[in-house]
Image (cartoon, coloured by chain):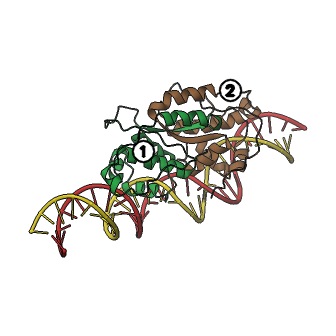
Chain colours: A green, B brown, C red, D yellow
Amino acid sequence: MTSTNEDIINALKTGRAAKGISQRDLSARTGVPQSHISKIESGNADIRLSSLIELARALELEVKLVPRKALPAIDSIIRSNQPPRPAATRAQHLRNQGMQESPASQPRPAYRLDEDEENPPGPEVD
Amino acid sequence: MTSTNEDIINALKTGRAAKGISQRDLSARTGVPQSHISKIESGNADIRLSSLIELARALELEVKLVPRKALPAIDSIIRSNQPPRPAATRAQHLRNQGMQESPASQPRPAYRLDEDEENPPGPEVD
DNA sequence: TATTTTGATATTCTATTATATATAACACTT
DNA sequence: AAGTGTTATATATAATAGAATATCAAAATA
């Protein structure tokens, strides 16, 4: 199924929830202001590509342009990379703001609840 | 290899070249102004997600957030979806503006020079 | 129980930049 | 020189990004 703004944003939100970090935490890791993250996740901002890449990276996700025809194969890989349902974080359990089951048309975004990684060395971004 | 702004933009440029259409053509298909496409492809604009999705869709590409760990598998699929080197379009052959071989760190973006498809029926976008 | 503290997310305001329109520049063909 | 196709640039407007602040709800304390 083709992605919309909403699908991408939902993938970010789900990724953050899966990692069990707050908007404030994510802000600290990426430099994107928490207020902006709030707007993004609420669907109240049309995010720039550079911000999307920044946030995705912090959630161990990558922005890719993939051929539409390869979507079924790629979705299959993403699904097989998906961990079992993570234990809800405290905030998530009590609040569950905006977090919903992925719509049928959208494959579950992939993430893994690994141990918290330090920022790996990587190319510096402007 | 993780994607940067430049990688995504290059994928768009390569996709457009592969499809053999002009910036004006792409503009007509997406509603994104040709002048903006020029800026985007020149690296002089930090494109918004909605515009990225629009342009990608016209090029039969999809924006996806994929798990970093799944990148090797996904890159492999993209590579196998890659057609043989398309015959250069007239403009591309004569000008070759900004079109370069993909850097080693970036897998070739995937596209296929199929017959020109009419716009498929799809959900209307705001 | 009531109040205060704490943690998380949402809203407001402003400067910078993306977007949209109009136009210019470039190169080839006739 | 004029016509054609393509890409780049100038300018005005609209929206994002960032800082500051507000709101909400649970936990801690008196």
Q: At 51% from the left edge and 46% from the top edge, which residue is drawn?
A: A49
Q: At 46% from the left edge and 55% from the top edge, which residue is drawn?
A: A40
Q: Is mark 1 in CB contact (under 8 Å) with mark 2? A: no
Relative image position of residue B90 (x, y in whole percent): 77, 32
Label 2 Cα neighbours within 10 Å, binned few <14 / some 14-19 / many ≥20: few
Residue B126 lies in quadrant: bottom right
Label 1 Cα neighbours within 10 Å, binned few <14 / some 14-19 / many ≥20: many
**C25 lies left or right of A88:** right
Asked if badges 1 and 2 are on one and the same chain, I answer no
**A116 lies left or right of B120:** left
Which structural element holds mark 1?
Answer: helix
Q: Which residue is mark 2?
A: B83
The foreground one among A2 and B110 is: A2
Tell me the chain of label 2: B
Position of the N terminus of chain A by quadrant:
top right
Relative image position of residue A11 (x, y in whole percent): 48, 46
Which structural element holds mark 2?
Answer: loop
Residue B102 lies in quadrant: top right
Relative image position of residue B53 (x, y in whole percent): 59, 47
Dot 2 amino acid type: Pro
Q: Is residue B102 visible?
A: no
Residue A103 shows which numbered tag? none
Dot 1 amino acid type: Gly
Q: Is residue B83 visible?
A: yes
The foreground one among C30 and B62 is: B62
Q: Which residue is mark 1?
A: A15
The foreground one among B33 and A70 is: A70
Tell me the chain of label 1: A
